[in-house]
Image (spheres, coloured by chain):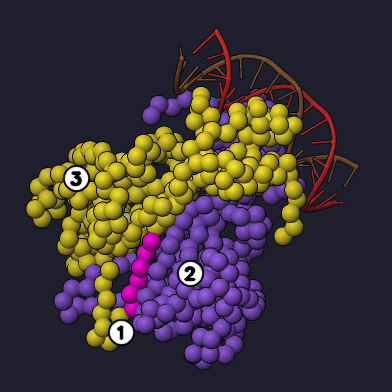
Chain colours: A purple, B yellow, C brown, D red
DNA sequence: CAGTGGTCTAGACCACGCG
DNA sequence: GCGTGGTCTAGACCACTGT
């Protein structure tokens, strides 16, 4: 439990203090890595490992060829679990842009298991990346069994999603939503799509929605940069007649 | 979206393949870092960054002075959100040991905000670390306003927790539980308590339970190693008379 | 082009675990 | 003491961004 002070740790503390006390302001660029290495009298490798800590904390954003910048806001964006449909984003929708893509694919191993359909079953895959300002802040891959797609006025799933502009569960028929949340490093794909460092953890949510008959109507793989997004889940206790619903 | 193959990335891929194909089995030790560096004809720094990727993925555990070991099981442990009381752990309780500590403290800034009590209010803090086999797999810090402690047959919160052996919400009076989940690097304290690398992300859950009057009866800060624990949240849709409750 | 971060080397020295 | 991983150095060379 004791601390073994290491040089890169000390340097990270020092820079962190300068950021949190406002000595260096959001949006500002830090001195170059070689410059800082000179200031602190360490090698560039050591200095870089100090910056890596701050990156992991989301305080600093590195941009290749440009420099290290102090991040603006921290943990402002929220993913709301369950029927988050009821507008987590509406307030922020003005600044929100979504890029969508729908593809016909077949269920394979893992996906088939999640959706509880036989291997090779036809699915529709919706991929969407949403942005907040310049930077991407979510990657969603949603899978719906092809034969369920028309259950609702969902003929064109794409436009449906565009309208909602959220990670709404596609089918309002679902009776139960199960969300599994994990913290893990991004895949190379996710890292480049979300434009985050491979060392920055992501918040990965696997959401499976089932209807009253227990049939899975949708599986979603949602990925958020861990340094900018939190997920919120609210559970209401049902007390006698008093029934609540989020 | 293109891949720029880097040496450490290639090496990580190669070792990962050897692990996932069973070429190197769980519990086994990898060759020493200098040995591997020799095999792959790279410097130790490069090899170490390859191992760092595998560590982040939870495939490999480094032990200072001993070596790099292949992890046994992956993502088997689950934290269950809401009223997880209803036994996430019972099955695993045999192998479970919990270390508890209760302390009288005062609410300060952040904590006071969570509990919605004035700064300086008396609280009881429960700290518990739970193990699975040799390795710790959770750190829980639970805060209860002192004047609420006796509301229930909770005179001795400590033994209460020991009985439950879970992260049960302490007071059954709570009507709403709100859990905020984030993926972030561990604090130095958390890293050493959970015996994880500072680069391995943790799944951090802040749980606030309120009673029917909206009064906060408990705040909990739960931290899990991201490479071994997932959190599961289930939301039931209330449909007419048919009301569900987890 | 100049300036920035990204990867890598070939070492040195320190801290930990174990016999 | 010996072998392990942990930190660090003082460079080299490559890749990206701007002018």
Horizontal side of A48 relative to B67 (left or right) equals right
Q: Residue at x 61, y 55 (%)?
A: A187
Assess whether mark 2 and mark 1 are in contact (beta carbons under 8 angstroms): no
Asked whether B16 or B53 is in front, the reply is: B16
Q: Please, what secondary structure does the residue beneath circle 2 have? A: helix
Asked whether C10 or D18 is in front, the reply is: C10
Answer whether residue B143 is magenta in the image: no
Magenta-drawn segment: B232-237
Count of labels shown? 3
Q: What x and y, as percent, mark residue B55?
A: 54, 41
Q: Mark 2 sits on what residue?
A: A114
Q: Which quarter of the image is occupied by the C terminus of chain A?
A: bottom left
Mark 1 neighbour class, 10 Å CA radius: few under 14, some 14 to 19, many 20 or more: few
Q: Which quarter of the image is occupied by the N terminus of chain A?
A: top left
Report whether residue B31 is seen: yes
Q: Mark 3 sits on what residue?
A: B162
Q: Please, what secondary structure does the residue beneath circle 3 have? A: helix
Q: What x and y, as percent, mark residue B169?
A: 23, 56
- For residue A218, the mark is none
Mark 2 chain? A
Main secondary structure found in the magenta portion = strand
Mark 3 chain? B
The label nearer to you, 3 versus 2, is 2
- For residue B239, the mark is 1
Rendering quarter of residue B159: top left
Label 1 and label 2: CA atoms lie apart by: 24 Å
Horizontal side of A153 relative to B167 (left or right) equals right
């Amino acid at each position: 439990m004791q601390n073994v002070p290491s040089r890169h740790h000390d340097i990270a503390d020092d820079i962190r203090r300068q950021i949190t006390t406002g000595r260096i302001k959001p949006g500002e660029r830090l001195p170059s890595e070689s410059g800082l290495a000179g200031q602190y009298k360490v090698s560039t490798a050591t200095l870089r490992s100090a910056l890596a800590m701050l990156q992991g904390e989301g305080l600093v954003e590195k941009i290749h060829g440009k420099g290290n910048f102090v991040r603006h806001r921290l943990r402002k964006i929220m993913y709301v679990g369950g029927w988050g449909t009821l507008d987590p984003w509406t307030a922020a929708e003005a600044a929100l842009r979504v890029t969508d893509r729908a593809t016909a694919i077949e269920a394979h191993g893992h996906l088939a298991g999640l959706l509880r359909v036989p291997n090779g079953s036809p699915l529709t895959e919706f991929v969407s990346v949403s942005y907040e300002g310049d930077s991407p802040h979510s990657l969603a891959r949603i899978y719906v069994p092809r034969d369920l797609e028309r259950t609702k006025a969902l003929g064109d799933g794409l436009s449906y999603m565009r309208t909602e502009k959220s990670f709404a569960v596609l089918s309002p028929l679902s009776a139960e939503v199960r969300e599994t949340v994990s913290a893990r490093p991004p895949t190379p794909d996710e890292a480049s799509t979300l434009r985050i460092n491979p060392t920055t953890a992501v918040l990965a949510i696997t959401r499976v929605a089932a209807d009253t008959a227990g049939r899975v109507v949708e599986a979603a793989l949602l990925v958020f940069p861990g340094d900018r997004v939190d997920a919120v889940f609210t559970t209401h206790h049902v007390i006698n007649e008093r029934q609540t619903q989020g």
